[in-house]
């Protein structure tokens, strides 16, 4: 097929068919492979560009993959053969910081940390803080309902979304939500589109909630353990404290060793695992000391409290470091906090059964784990590693968990969705998809 000349005329240089663009925008940061090369990339610069693109694609039955910065890890943005890639990266304007109402109006392509920096100039901050905050976009975060390092204190992205601008599959523009704190007019369409992974509509802009920057200097702490199960029990106990930390992350010993080899940060390799975290506010020091003492009561072997962010920065390096070492096959499971010790023990047993190196990093404070399995770059080895991931995912489900905590289903986890959702739940989701995208052009075969 060819892209109709009327679309090329409307979009001008925002529509690209260069080999470099087709190749560059065909994939994302996951291990998923595009099914083929797209026919064109649309570099949208406005809501009107998105509307025109989707109206044409819907009329002609052309599949569309939606892309922000391409940092997704579930294969949700990889290209369709002969399809369009709709990139929102150029829609990167922060339209307004509303100090009084603590809101920001932003386009979908705004980089997460750029919004946080802009809000900081007004004494505010944007709570969601994915590890990829310096590259991921607000639109992508909302589309996947991303989590991050500060979830333990502030919740996931959905908790910071007040309103959305969404372009539907036929090109119509939908406004959801409101700028008010309370709003129960009609169905909660903002929540419907948040986390929908581009399957129901394309998020082009959002009104997001900001919070005041806490007073005082933050405190960073590190606590080491000789047993993973002790670390799990310590996190469960921390979760029962009156005040949560801002950040509470876990890295097992293999992860720390790999990160330090990739880019030294001074993080000491523990016997089994290390918890790194941060407390904020006027009582940050006292809260950090209470957390460390709780860890000592649950088998901690070493600890420190500092005012440096280096330990948190080391956590952000985990994904590139593990990928560079060959731990390319990973998953994103979540379990209740009370089951952390059990899931860590189960992962160790699964790794032993399969004879595979499994390295685990986790947003420990909310029970979201990211185990990675070492695999050579061959189909056979990847299949063996996937078998390990399947066992870990089923273990998480058996403990009352979920197949994905923050990365989304995309294309990589589609086969796992039936492990968690029953037929009725999937039929309801399919009915909503059919109502909003009857031609099935928006990210088909992914998300659910």
Image (cartoon, helix red, strand yellow):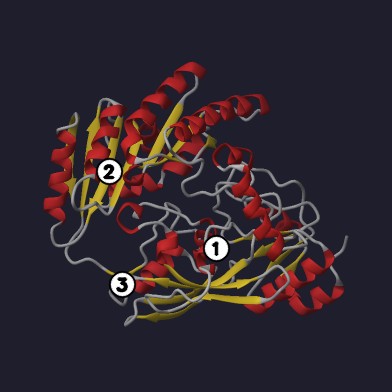
Between 72 and 196, the residue placed more toward the observer is 196
Lower sequence index among marks 3 and 1: 3
- Camera-nearest label, 2 or 1: 1
Report the side of 407 relative to 285 (left or right). Answer: right
Where residue 128 appears, as percent x and y from the top left, is: 39, 60
Q: Residue at x 71, y 47 (%)?
A: 34
Element on which disc 1 rests: helix
Lower sequence index among marks 2 and 3: 3
* Contact, mark 2 vs mark 1 (Cβ under 8 Å): no
Where residue 415 appears, as percent x and y from the top left, is: 64, 38
- Which residue matches tag 2? 276
* Contact, mark 2 vs mark 3 (Cβ under 8 Å): no
Mark 3 surroundings: few (<14), some (14-19) or many (≥20) residues within 10 A:
many
- Which residue matches tag 1? 192
Between 289 and 263, the residue placed more toward the observer is 289
Q: CA distance from mark 2 to mark 3?
A: 24 Å
Report the side of 262 relative to 125 (left or right). Answer: right
Q: Residue at x 13, y 58 (%)?
A: 283
- Which residue matches tag 3? 124
Q: Examine the rendered structure and indicate whether residue 152 appears above or below residue 207.
A: above
Report the side of 384 relative to 82 (left or right). Answer: left
Mark 2 surroundings: few (<14), some (14-19) or many (≥20) residues within 10 A:
many
Q: CA distance from mark 2 to mark 1?
A: 34 Å
- Camera-nearest label, 3 or 1: 1
**Residue 125 appearing in the image:** yes
Element on which disc 2 rests: strand
């Amino acid at each position: 097929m060819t892209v109709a000349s009327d679309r090329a005329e409307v979009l001008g240089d925002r529509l690209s068919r260069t080999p470099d663009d087709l190749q560059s925008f065909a994939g994302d940061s996951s291990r998923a492979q595009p099914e083929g090369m797209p026919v064109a990339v649309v570099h949208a610069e406005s809501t009107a560009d998105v509307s025109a693109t989707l109206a044409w694609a819907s009329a002609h039955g052309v599949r569309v993959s939606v892309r922000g910065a391409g940092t997704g890890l579930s294969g949700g943005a990889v290209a369709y053969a002969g399809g369009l890639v709709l990139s929102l990266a150029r829609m990167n304007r922060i339209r307004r910081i509303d100090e009084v109402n603590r809101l920001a109006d932003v386009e979908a392509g705004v980089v997460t940390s750029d919004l946080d920096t802009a809000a900081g100039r007004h004494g505010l901050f944007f709570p969601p803080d994915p590890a990829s905050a310096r590259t991921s976009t607000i639109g992508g975060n909302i589309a996947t309902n991303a989590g991050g390092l500060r979830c333990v204190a502030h919740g996931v992205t959905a908790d910071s979304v007040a309103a959305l601008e969404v372009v539907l599959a036929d090109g119509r523009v939908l406004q959801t939500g409101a700028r008010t704190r309370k709003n129960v007019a009609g169905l909660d369409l903002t929540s419907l589109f948040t986390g929908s992974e581009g399957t129901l509509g394309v998020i082009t802009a959002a009104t997001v909630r900001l919070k005041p920057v806490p007073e005082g200097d933050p405190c960073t702490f590190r606590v080491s353990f000789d047993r993973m199960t002790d670390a799990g029990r310590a996190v469960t106990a921390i979760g029962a404290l009156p005040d949560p930390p801002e950040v509470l992350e876990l890295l097992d010993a293999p992860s720390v060793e790999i990160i330090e080899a990739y880019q030294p940060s001074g993080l000491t390799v523990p016997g089994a695992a290390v918890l790194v975290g941060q407390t904020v506010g006027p009582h940050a020091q006292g809260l950090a000391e209470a957390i460390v003492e709780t860890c000592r009561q649950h088998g901690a072997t070493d600890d420190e409290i500092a005012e440096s962010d280096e330990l948190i920065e080391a956590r952000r390096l985990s994904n590139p470091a593990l990928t560079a070492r060959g731990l390319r096959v990973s998953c994103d499971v979540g379990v209740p906090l009370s089951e952390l010790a059990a899931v860590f023990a189960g992962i160790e047993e699964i790794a032993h059964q399969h004879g595979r190196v499994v390295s685990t990093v986790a947003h420990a404070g909310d029970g979201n784990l990211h185990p990675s399995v070492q695999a050579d770059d061959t189909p056979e080895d990847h299949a063996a590693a996937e078998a390990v991931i399947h066992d870990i995912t089923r273990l998480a489900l058996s403990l009352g968990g979920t197949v994905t905590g923050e990365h989304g289903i995309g294309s990589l986890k589609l086969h796992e969705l039936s492990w968690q959702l029953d037929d009725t739940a999937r039929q309801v989701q399919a009915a909503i998809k059919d109502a909003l995208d009857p031609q099935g052009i928006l990210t088909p075969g992914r998300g659910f």
